[in-house]
Amino acid sequence: MATREEILAAAQRHLNVDPRASMAVLAAAAGVGRATLHRHFSSRDDLLHELGARSHDRWEESMDAVGVDEVATSRDPERIEACLRELMGRYLADSDDFGFALTDAVLTSAPDLLARSDRLAEREVALLAAAQEVGVLRDDLPARWLGHAVYGLLVAARDAVREGDVPRRDLDDLVLTTFLKGTSA
Amino acid sequence: MATREEILAAAQRHLNVDPRASMAVLAAAAGVGRATLHRHFSSRDDLLHELGARSHDRWEESMDAVGVDEVATSRDPERIEACLRELMGRYLADSDDFGFALTDAVLTSAPDLLARSDRLAEREVALLAAAQEVGVLRDDLPARWLGHAVYGLLVAARDAVREGDVPRRDLDDLVLTTFLKGTSA
DNA sequence: TCGACTTGAGACATGAATGTCTCATGTGAG
DNA sequence: CTCACATGAGACATTCATGTCTCAAGTCGA
């Protein structure tokens, strides 16, 4: 009946609402028996790990899609800026699906996911650093800080929408302009 | 031996490192028997709740200290801007002690804490809105979004320091300039 | 139709954390 | 010194999620 993919999708959806849902709850959410859930994922960690891997897949796909590495070495200000903008939009789209992953403890403790996260962040930081070198971004801030700032704004965006303070459709512009231009008049 | 205050302080310190520490661990961290911990706090929720209340106290104290309400109604651009800057510095100092509270699930589910959080956020948003009205902050962004952005940057700051990407002493300037001026060159 | 396979329901054992309770010990006030 | 009191250690009972297992029912293909 329910394929592994459908189960994962249901779990993903549900975890975005209740990040601490038990296996029983996740099974119910997927319309599947608890035993069946365990047939697909030997443990809860296993399931979370799989979802974590997929969120990293999305992160990587987003960076690949905009050609982060190539653009970073292009030294073309316009391409770099366009790349940054597109990347942010993709991140926001990704966080619609994987918002829970932004702050989930399990995902930030698995060593392999951590290692991968580091590698991906490194690619992102390379783009940010390149943006600084060609004058797209201020170069008086550590590139790694810029990475953290992006992340922080994603968390802010997720929460703002969750709490109904901002409509989803406004998010892209809101986050981008806040990140790039700040909030000063 | 260990007073209630000392226990709370130890728990606070420890939860900043391991937000999911058990009562047994927290008791050990406070150098106190598990039974004694329970004599002070009937349940883990009780302890967390107390810490949550204190983090709200700090938030409130910070806003009181800079006179948020009075400044917000002053319509004096310079005072408002100075107030914003000072407030951000205080928030960062607060998050040194209560960083874990920024994202802890227990604290964001207790109804009374939530209600209080709403009230405090409202005062903060009033200041942000005032800043917009007198031309200190851009008025093309929802004031509530500005509040979320502040929060997101606090999370970013906490993580950046945790991961060693930014020295603590640089945080104040980093966060402030990122928030106000953004990252564009 | 038959048979191999999958599924959901549920029983079961386990482990972790919680909260309660008792008791021997140690300390401080009088 | 002595007594009242708080403490730490630890035994217990309970709860909850987990992971395993079995079994009856259903499905799909031969």
Image: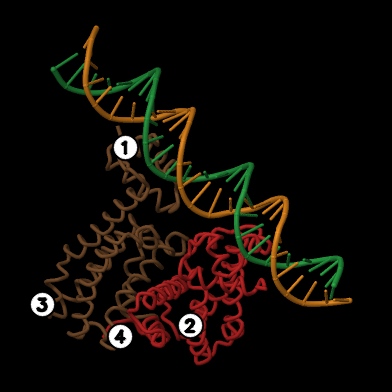
Chain colours: A brown, B red, C orange, D green
Q: Amino acid at mark 2?
A: Met
What residue appears at the point 48 percent right and 82 percent down from the top-left corner? B88
Q: For this rendering, which residue is in front, A180 or B20? A: B20
Q: Secondary structure at mark 1?
A: helix
Quarter of the image that includes the N terminus of chain B: bottom right
Q: How far apart are the alpha carbons under marks 4 and 1?
A: 49 Å
In the rendered structure, are the residues bearing label 3 and label 1 in contact, judged by CB atoms less than 8 Å apart?
no
Lower sequence index among marks 4 and 3: 3
Q: Amino acid at mark 4?
A: Leu
Instruction: Identify the chain of the residue marked 4, using the numbered disc in the image.
Output: A
Q: Secondary structure at mark 2?
A: helix
Residue, disc 1: A39
Q: Report the residue that reaches farthest toward the bottom.
A: B78
Residue, disc 4: A141
Q: Mark 2 packing: few (<14 Cα in 10 Å), some, or many (20+)?
A: many
Q: How far apart are the alpha carbons under marks 4 and 3?
A: 21 Å
Residue, disc 3: A74
Mark whose residue sits in front, 4 or 1 = 1
Q: Secondary structure at mark 4?
A: loop
Are the residues under marks 2 and 3 on the same chain? no
Lower sequence index among marks 4 and 1: 1
Q: How far apart are the alpha carbons under marks 2 and 3?
A: 37 Å
Q: Secondary structure at mark 3?
A: helix
Residue B167's spot in the image, x, y percent?
A: 37, 84
Q: Amino acid at mark 3?
A: Ser
Q: Mark 1 packing: few (<14 Cα in 10 Å), some, or many (20+)?
A: few
In the rendered structure, are the residues bearing label 2 and label 3 in contact, judged by CB atoms less than 8 Å apart?
no
